[in-house]
Image (cartoon, rainbow, N blue to C red):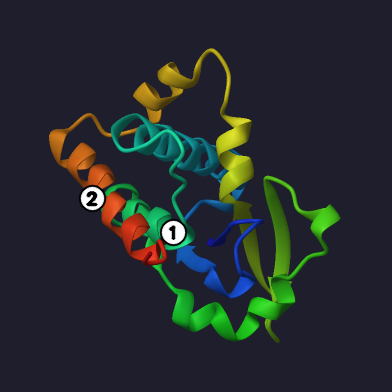
């Protein structure tokens, strides 16, 4: 399955496409799991680095590729990105598209809404279920701070 990671408030061309083999019978369950993983990664970033820091699509793809078996395929699907543009009022946690001449299915996940959908009193339990419990993972999450610092304008 192809997923497009995007952020409602970001430039639409900053989206990243990722891929993972998924049994079509489990697509709904796997998409929900991915949304929960993304929300959990964001919560961990807030805990380790800064409660006001928000990861972008590139950062999310990096972690998903390294720890969750996804592959970045942005170069292959970027030519179809405009087919995934939506008016503001149509954005949701996820939106489904079919792009290109072969009508390849793509599920867009809004990183902000993914995080918000995971908020609540059980967020720590969700993190415990969805994230690796390793020092290496935490170091990689903390290292995302460098991406954020590069994005800040110089004063």
Does residue 34 appear left or right of residue 99 in this picture? left
Q: Secondary structure at mark 1?
A: loop
Q: Residue at x 25, y 43 (%)?
A: 142
Q: Secondary structure at mark 2?
A: helix
- Tag 1 residue: 20
> Which of the two discs, 1 and 2, labels the residue nearer the N terminus?
1
Q: Residues within 10 Å of mark 1 (few under 14, many from 20)?
A: some
Looking at the rendered image, the quarter that the C terminus falls into is: bottom left
Task: Tell me the mark number nearer the camera, choosing from 1 and 2.
Answer: 2
Q: In the rendering, at what x and y percent does residue 132 appear?
A: 27, 34
Q: Nearer the viewer, residue 116 or 49?
A: 49
Q: Nearer the viewer, residue 105 or 5?
A: 5
Q: In the rendering, at what x and y percent does residue 152 appear?
A: 40, 61
* Count of numbered marks: 2
Figure check: 19 above or below 46? below
Q: Residue at x 15, y 41 (%)?
A: 136
Q: Which mark is residue 129?
A: none
- Tag 2 residue: 143
Spot the residue most to the front.
155
């Amino acid at each position: 399955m192809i997923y497009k990671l995007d952020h409602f408030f970001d430039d639409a061309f900053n989206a990243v496409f990722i891929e993972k083999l998924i049994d079509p019978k489990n697509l709904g369950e796997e998409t929900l799991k991915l949304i929960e993983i993304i929300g959990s990664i964001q919560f961990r970033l807030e805990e380790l680095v800064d409660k006001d820091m928000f990861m972008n699509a590139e950062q999310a793809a990096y972690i998903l590729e390294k720890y969750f078996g996804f592959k970045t395929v942005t170069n292959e699907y970027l030519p179809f990105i405009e087919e995934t543009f939506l008016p503001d009022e149509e954005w949701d946690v996820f939106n489904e598209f079919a792009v290109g001449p072969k009508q390849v299915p793509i599920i867009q996940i809004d990183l902000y809404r993914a995080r918000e959908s995971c908020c609540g009193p059980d967020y720590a339990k969700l993190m415990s279920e969805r994230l690796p419990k390793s020092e290496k993972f935490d170091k990689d999450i903390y290292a995302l701070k460098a991406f954020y610092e590069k994005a800040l304008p110089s004063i």
